């Protein structure tokens, strides 16, 4: 069966202005999240820099708004049924309008400057983290309460620095632990810490520092902190920065940089912050950081586990030409800085021994991949059974079959810089955009 999918884009300008106009008391104007200075809510890019190692102007500034961005329908083709079937015939015929996806503002149209994480907290609320260091609880109407304010501890000197990730402990219900990964203030290092919630508030003073990773440059700090079904903590670390990985950290098992590490933090304490699981792939190898689970990464920006299969999906930001999505297994070498995407990064190379990406796109289509989530419970066409991800610069959103990965399919343009994807307890899927409402995937209304 063949179909042609017509996706109608949201009239972005109208939606944004409507939201900001109708919810002027929300988000940035709330005292709990108001910036203390201009720096705190400056729009910054994630993961893109020039070949010289100097940070580029904000990709958002480079993106030329066009008619295509906001109003015109995009015609794309897609296999018909989800899960996306790579063996299906080429698409044919129009989809029913009811099957078309759209994005609509969620949480009362709340706008944050740099939202980077949205996680289910309970049945009715989500945790929302902004790169400034603020963590909030939000209900569906956008009512919010402050959970954690790390602005005094989070460094924002580099354009890619800040509070970068958040995760609830697997035993949160009994221990109240919240995990955060951020750039430390007044220094150049990344920090993984545990905080403890009491009555839904975590005092900064409850911090237990579990891992600190010196950052030779201010960019490429990763990262996501996630818990696997094995109960262990996974953290994605960038290659240390500049451009081209000058110290070749990506291919150095003696450095945590450019790696995904796996830690047992169940009994974390000041004297023993973590234990290295005995089943980590390089345990017993001399001269190796045995925290490493996988290596050869440049700047893993957003990773997530498939709740159904346990698979680990990672978006790894490219240098100047290719962005990639990786399915990461124990001990994999993802190729950087020998490979960028599927191509030798510097002249000729031996590509054997590297795990190739699941999906690659070039800089005609974007400039900085934002890894997403495997969707299982949204009830929406094209999403359930798919890994959905996007590009920070172009706003393009793609899906790839999570079970039988085939060719990625472009789904739509999001109305802004895609910084992250998230889900709530009901299975709704969200896109986090800089300086724009948090958007939720919905079935589009028939025109
Ligand atoms: Ca790679």
Image (tube, helix red, strand yellow):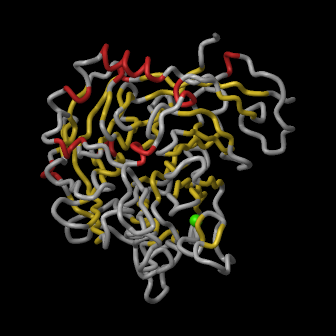
Is residue 274 shown above or below 162? below
Q: Position of residue 255 (x, y in %)?
A: 40, 78
Relative side of 82 to 444, left or right: right
Relative side of 438 to 273, left or right: right
Is residue 432 shown above or below 25? below
What residue lies at 42% left-to-right and 72% top-to-bottom?
A: 291
Q: Quadrant of residue 400?
A: top right
Residue 91 in sight here: yes
Quarter of the rendered structure image containing ligand 1: bottom right
User: Which one is in front, 205 or 21?
Assistant: 21
What residue lies at 28% left-to-right and 32% top-to-bottom?
A: 137
Q: Position of residue 298 (x, y in %)?
A: 48, 66
Is residue 280 shown above or below 1? below
From the image, which quarter does the C terminus lie in?
Answer: top right
From the image, which quarter does the N terminus lie in?
Answer: top right
Q: Position of residue 373 (x, y in %)?
A: 53, 43
Residue 332 in sight here: no
What residue lies at 43% left-to-right and 60% top-to-bottom?
A: 234
How many marks overall? 0
User: Which one is in front, 128 or 65?
Assistant: 65
Which residue ends up furthest to the top in the rendered image? Answer: 447
User: Which one is in front, 91 or 326?
Assistant: 91
Q: Position of residue 433 (x, y in %)?
A: 41, 36
What residue lies at 50% left-to-right and 29% top-to-bottom?
A: 428
């Amino acid at each position: 069966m063949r179909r042609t999918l017509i996706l109608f884009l949201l009239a972005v300008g109208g939606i944004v202005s409507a939201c900001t106009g109708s919810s002027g008391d929300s988000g940035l104007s709330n005292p709990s999240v108001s910036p203390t200075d201009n720096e705190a809510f400056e729009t910054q890019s994630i993961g893109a820099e020039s070949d010289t190692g100097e940070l580029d102007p904000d990709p958002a500034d480079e993106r030329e708004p066009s008619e295509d961005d906001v109003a015109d329908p995009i015609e794309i083709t897609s296999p018909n049924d989800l899960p996306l079937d790579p063996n299906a015939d080429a698409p044919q015929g129009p989809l029913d309008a009811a099957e078309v996806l759209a994005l609509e503002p969620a949480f009362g149209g709340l706008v944050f400057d740099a939202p980077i994480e949205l996680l289910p907290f309970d049945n009715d609320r989500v945790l929302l983290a902004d790169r400034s260091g603020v963590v909030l609880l939000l209900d569906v109407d956008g009512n919010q309460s402050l959970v954690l304010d790390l602005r005094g501890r989070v460094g924002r000197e580099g354009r890619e620095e800040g509070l970068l990730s958040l995760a609830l402990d697997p035993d949160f219900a009994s221990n109240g632990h919240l995990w955060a990964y951020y750039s430390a203030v007044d220094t150049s290092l990344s920090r993984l810490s545990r905080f403890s919630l009491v009555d839904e508030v975590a005092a900064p003073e409850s911090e237990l520092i579990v891992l600190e990773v010196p950052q030779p440059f201010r960019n490429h700090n990763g990262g996501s902190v996630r818990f696997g079904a094995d109960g262990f903590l996974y953290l994605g670390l960038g290659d240390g920065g500049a451009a081209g990985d000058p110290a070749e950290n990506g291919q150095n098992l003696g450095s945590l940089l450019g790696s995904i590490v796996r830690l047992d933090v169940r009994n974390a304490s000041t004297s023993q912050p973590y234990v290295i699981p005995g089943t980590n792939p390089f345990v017993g190898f001399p001269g190796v950081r045995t925290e490493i689970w996988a290596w050869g990464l440049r700047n893993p920006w957003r990773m997530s586990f498939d709740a159904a299969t346990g698979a680990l999906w990672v978006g790894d930001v490219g240098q100047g030409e290719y962005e990639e999505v990786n399915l990461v297994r124990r001990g994999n070498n993802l190729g950087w800085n020998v490979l960028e995407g599927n191509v030798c990064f510097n002249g000729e190379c031996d590509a054997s021994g590297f795990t190739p990406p699941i999906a690659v796109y070039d800089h005609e289509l974007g400039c900085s991949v934002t890894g997403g989530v495997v969707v299982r419970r949204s009830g929406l066409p094209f999403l359930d059974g798919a890994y959905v991800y996007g590009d920070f610069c172009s706003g393009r959103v793609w899906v790839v079959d999570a079970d039988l990965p085939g060719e990625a399919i472009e789904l739509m343009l999001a109305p802004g810089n895609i910084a992250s994807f998230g889900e709530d307890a009901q299975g709704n899927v969200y896109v986090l955009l800089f300086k724009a409402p948090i958007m939720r995937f919905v079935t589009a209304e028939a025109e």
